[in-house]
Image (cartoon, helix red, strand yellow):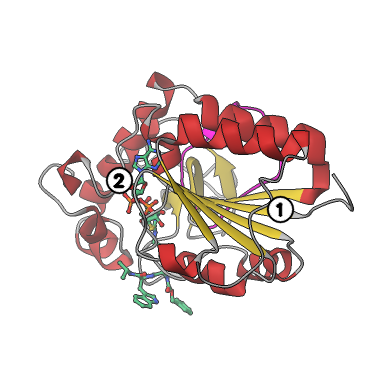
Amino acid sequence: MARHTRIVVLTGAGISAESGLPTFRDADGLWEGHDPMQVATPEAYADDPDLVQRFYDERRAALSRVEPNAAHRALARLEAELGDDLLVVTQNVDDLHERAGSRRVHHVHGRLRSAWCTTCDERHDWSGPLADRPPCPACGAATLRPDIVWFGELPYGMDVVEEALEHSDLFVSIGTSGLVYPAAAFVHWARGATLELNLEPSAGATDFAESRTGPATRLVPAWVGEVLTGSSGRGRARGPR
Ligand code: BV8
Ligand code: ZN
């Protein structure tokens, strides 16, 4: 591989689908009959905090019933080779990237296994429920909410993402429908080559120089193999297909 290639990978729910976690679009899109988009808002939390806490308590509990898959593991392998030249930016709130061995993972929409105290603003690694209003380990207040970015809230670390995309030689989007912003706009922030790996072309497929379709557990290890053996995989230079 010539000059070291700086790669930014964006992942969405599709990369965790084959681990058994429902995506937003499938699982008939409903949670207990609620549109997730309706539960994942500060307004919903103000109106019915128990409902929202239960929504996230169940998803947090479900994490212990699933494992990372070949796509997560392939990205961990790539990080082992590329080190700081790879950054995984994920919309997912699950911890499967980290459990597969990835270290350089940036959760733009938060993490299920983290609780945020709205009194002292501290964040705490958390694996149990929150619906029973446990006290904050720092200030004791019963004001722990899921450390999740809800619709209408500013995603985490947009400056980190913008910086990484500006200096990236390759931007790869995996398992995302490209319907939620600002993540869906990252392809436009990327300065280098662009590649989409998705079960079906996403809403932004034509914004990518190359778009491959298929399951992540097949596409991602194959792409990582190409990068590590230097047989391209570094996507085509910019510009629509
Ligand atoms: C903000 C945490 C402003 C919660 C999430 C511009 C235009 C239009 C709308 C907006 C806009 N700007 C802002 C908005 C509003 C909104 C938005 O985008 N709405 C959409 C619905 C139109 N955006 C926001 O509110 C954002 N905040 O803009 O703040 C602001 C500015 C200043 C100051 C204050 C505020 C915040 C958005 C984040 C919300 N939180 N998640 C939780 O998880 O419960 S978003 C959540 O939904 C996910 O994190 C993810 O981002 C999104 C779901 O998308 P995907 O992950 O792509 O999943 P999906 O099911 O859609 O698709 C799965 C894909 O995988 C499919 O393509 C499928 O084909 C593929 N697939 C399936 N199986 C496989 C596979 N691929 C490969 N292999 C497989 N096996
Ligand atoms: Zn506190």
> Could you tell me residue 47's position as x and y percent?
20, 63
Queried whether the magenta region covers residue 136, the answer comes back as: no
Residue in the image at 27% along x and 43% along y: 55
Which mark is first along the chain, 1 or 2?
1
Residue in the image at 44% along x and 59% along y: 149
Q: Please tell me whether residue 27 is drawn above or below residue 154 in the rendered image.
A: above
Numbered disc 1: secondary structure: strand
Q: Amino acid at mark 2?
A: Gln
Q: Is residue 203 left or right of residue 2?
A: left
Quadrant for the N terminus, please. Answer: top right
Queried whether the magenta region covers residue 95, the answer comes back as: yes
Q: Which residues are magenta?
A: 91-108
Q: Nearer the viewer, residue 185 or 103?
A: 185
Quadrant holding ligand 1?
Answer: bottom left
> Could you tell me residue 202's position as x and y percent?
37, 58
Q: Which residue is mark 1?
A: 7
